[in-house]
Amino acid sequence: MSTQKTISPVDGRVVDQRPLANGAQIEQTLARATAAQRGWRSAPLSERCAILSKFVEWMEARAQEIGEEITWQMGRPIRYAPNEIRRGFAERARYMIGAAPQQLADIAIAPAPGFTRFIRREPVGVVFTIAPWNYPYLTAVNSVVPALLAGNAVVLKHSAQTPLCAGRFAQGLAAAGLPAGVFQTLDLSHADVERVIGDSRIAFAAFTGSVQGGHAVQAAAAGRFIATGLELGGKDPAYVRADADLAHAAENLVDGAMFNSGQSCCGIERIYVHRGVYDEFVQRAVELTRGYLLGNPLDEATTLGPMVRTQAADFVRAQIAEAVAKGATAHIDGAAFPGNRPGTPYLAPQILTGVNHSMRVMTEETFGPLAPIMAVASDEEAIALMNDSAYGLTAAIWTSDAEAALHIGGQIDTGTWFMNRCDYLDPALAWTGVKDSGRGCTLSVLGFDQVTRPKSFHLRTVTT
């Protein structure tokens, strides 16, 4: 039997080790999910909402200990980790619970004599969610909660780096009173993930991860008429106009690039600044970046923890080295960060200037604590450079001119357009991407669409 081992980036210890599911266990899980879903879909929506609300409360009550688990599994500083539950997770879950009664209600059609017509949103059946490690609860909640609210059963396969998170979902939902079998977890090999997607009992697959992983999910589903939701990351740009509040812009953008050690699909990965304010912006960004404290993420004073693994940190180091070799300037001395240790996941943050689109650092997803900054002469140049990417998840502008922000935003290929903020998911807005950032939509009033199917009722009254 194959074993899954989770190595902590904090100190290299094994924080979890477990066997992967075998064929019989996978079969039993899917059979239980299919049987349990038949009863769950018949439960009143008010009951489903009440159970999910209790689940959120259960998670909030354990936010600190769950945060410590996050820190050990993927390295986020403990001063921030519990807030994934207290803020983002709870905010998104409660938004979807509150929206469910309206969004899952029958859609009435204008009355016609002798006819009753309406459209009902029915659950698709069994939803398979494949969740990543970087925000293990924020990403999973986007599909798990609306799927359950809509009357689906859910099978969650979490990242091998954050397996304890799947267990917390299961414990919390069971404590909240969710019927057995409606939510289950599986630890799977890549090959078995593809087999599960191809199983006729899976009605929808939600995946958050790499472009390569998204292609594998899409290929596994290709032989079946099921939809997939794919959130595949980005190379998210920001544009600082000459009329921006530079103090605000620098503070927001440095945080947007460095938070979670830059390991965010909607983190800032490239910054374009108008030449008129370029020097001042760079100075502010460098000063802020030098203020980070890289070290043990279990220390409350630490503001920058290790990356998830040494390989990931080395990837960022290679991007920086290539850019510098091509003429870029690195503004942060790694030696000024005592925690910076080559050959480990501990990597100092970096600001690069003198960059251009011939460098991987401006075109290839970095997923690390790095902010490359490039000067531009006009809005038109910024628009062209922002769109020069295989990705399109989010993009942002810093300006005091809201009309200009709307005009420029209309020309940017992106799923979300921000003005004077970044790196945030508003649950009332659709979370979606274009190009290699994926397909599908979660959150907002549209978030229930992918976990339901429309069924039309056309009823004629016959009188004699």
Image (tube, grey):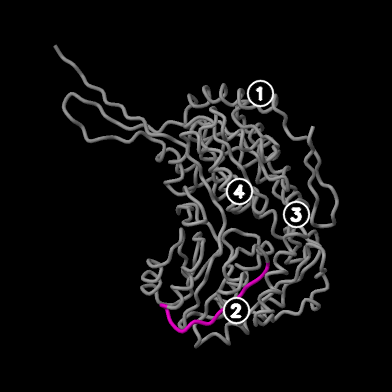
Task: Indicate which disc residue 71 carries.
Answer: 3
Q: Nearer the viewer, residue 36 or 5?
A: 5
| Quadrant (top left, top right, bottom left, bottom right) of the C terminus | top left
Q: Which mark is residue 355?
A: 2
Q: Nearer the viewer, mark 1 or mark 3?
A: 1
Residue kind at label 4, given as amino acid type: Gly
SS at mark 3 in the image: helix
Indicate yes or no whether the magenta region holds residue 200. Answer: no
**Where residue 442 appears, x then y in whole percent?**
49, 47
Label 1: element kind:
helix
Sequence-first tag of 4 and 1: 1
Q: Secondary structure at mark 2?
A: loop
How crowded pointer 1 is (Cα within 10 Å; few <14, some 14-19, many 20+) is rated as: few
Determine the residue positioned at 50% across, 86% down: 275
Mark 1 and mark 3 lie on one chain; the one further toward the N terminus is 1
Residue bearing the label numbered 4: 213
- The answer to which of marks 2 and 3 sits earlier in the sequence is 3
Between the C-alphas of marks 2 and 1, the distance is: 54 Å
Q: Nearer the viewer, mark 2 or mark 3?
A: 2
Residue wearing tag 1: 28
Circle 2: residue type: Val
